[in-house]
Image (cartoon, rainbow, N blue to C red):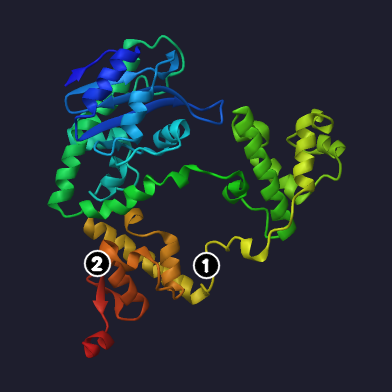
Amino acid sequence: MMIHPLIDNDADLAALCARLATHDFVAVDTEFMRESTYWPELCLLQIASVDEAAAIDPMIGLDMTPLLELLVNNRDVLKVFHAGGQDLEIIHNMTGKVPIPLFDTQIAAMALGHGEQIGYSNLVESMLGHSLDKGARFTDWSRRPLDKRQIDYAIADVTHLATIFPRMVDKLKRNGRGAWLDEEMERLADPSSFDFPPEDAWKRLKLPGRNAQVLGRLRAIAAWRETEARGKNLPRGRIIKDDTLGELASHAPKTQEDLGKVRGLSAGWRNNDIGARLMMAIGNARPIEPDEMPTREPNRPGLTKDAALVSDLLKLLLKIRSKETGVAAKLIARSDELEALAAGVRKELHILSGWRFEEFGRDALDLVEGRLAFATENGKLKMTRTIMDVVEA
């Protein structure tokens, strides 16, 4: 594979993208910084085909149009990432689109017996048999100039990825699990995953109880913080910490002067502009409506104590099936689906259709409905069909 030096001019970038566009797939990775910003700052983008690899510097005024065109508009080239959520977020922020079609090797690894959320270094070691140099892992990617070790480290990520991907596809084809991943990749490529409305920010926080008025204030304050953080391009915590949000929602200040008494806020909030905007958000808050109230966790509606026990049995069954098939439990079923099945839900559950039904859902349904039971034999746990099931057969 040809390794190019750092791409730092428009002509070389355009020529590289034209060549990459002739391949079936490209491996993509990014280096970014976001410790002091709300939006991740793209510092370097690495890309490779089976023939060549390069790092591209977006911080020097390059015309990124050919690269973005390849990533988000060229549907003939598959884009391969590893744990690509933040990479996709960066590209979505730049274009409003997500690279398609795409493939995530971390998700694929779950179907190939590598466990849940395997790190890239571990995947490389497992599939290629050698360790990565992690010396530049915590470098400041925004500082210029980048040295050769940094660039080599960054490019190595995509060169290994371009080698690993065909091997993973071959394994998926041999064990018939390739189609299993289609739904997961479609979900990953859904642009709505990156369109996060400020009014939903409260749902990501630890809720201070279930009082409708308090939650209404929390929703208003969290939305206000999200807007402030985006506008200033600062991390949310630089505006107000999460625990301070909860305190403000639970014990709302009556005047802006009272903000100076709130733990986590400086005295300046009593008379500055940001304090005034915060008080306006609190004043405009409305209570959460009953249909907006979040469901209690871990229970779902209708999940009785007995159903909760059944849910625990389903989780045990999932653990057994995961071990038997070598497929990560997280890929097979989510906890909320197991709880829904235990509570009597039978419609619109992923585990009751497609490959998930064949690998797990059929037995899960039989367990819930009394046709399957746990037993021990010689000290080992196993599944047995009930007599009722035999009679019915």
Q: Hey, which residue is sitting farthest bottom in the picture?
A: 391
Dividing the picture into quadrants, the one containing residue 352 is bottom left
Residue in the foreground of this view, choosing between 11 and 276: 11
Give the tally of numbered discs.
Answer: 2
Q: Residues within 10 Å of mark 2 (few under 14, many from 20)?
A: few
For the residue pair 270 and 39, the one nearer the viewer reads as 39
Q: Secondary structure at mark 2?
A: helix
* Location of residue 304 in the rendering, given as x and y in whole percent from the top left corner: 52, 75
The residue depicted at 70 percent of the width and 44 percent of the height is: 221
Find numbered disc 1 in the image and state the secondary structure of the residue it sits on.
loop
Q: Quadrant of the N terminus?
A: top left
Residue 161 drawn above or below residue 363:
above
Residue displayed at 66% across by 44% down: 222
Q: Which mark is residue 300?
A: 1
> Mark 1, residues whose alpha carbon is within 10 Å: few (<14), some, or many (≥20)?
some
Toward the left, the furthest residue is 174
The residue at 36%/63% (across/down) is: 350
Side (left or right) of 185 relative to 198: left
Expressed as whole percent of the image width and height from the top left, the position of residue 296 reads 58, 63
- Asked if the residue under mark 2 is in contact with the one under mark 1, i.e. CB atoms within 8 Å, the reply is no
Amino acid carrying mark 2 in the image: Glu
| Cα distance in 3D space between marks 1 and 2 | 25 Å
Q: Which mark is residue 358?
A: 2
Q: Quadrant of the C terminus?
A: bottom left
Residue 66 coordinates in the image, percent (x, y): 33, 24
| Three-letter residue code for mark 1 | Arg
Picture coordinates of residue 173 (x, y %)?
15, 50
Which numbered circle lies on residue 346?
none
Which of these two is toward me, 121 or 89? 89
The residue under the point 29% across, 14% down is: 12
Side (left or right) of 210 relative to 381:
right
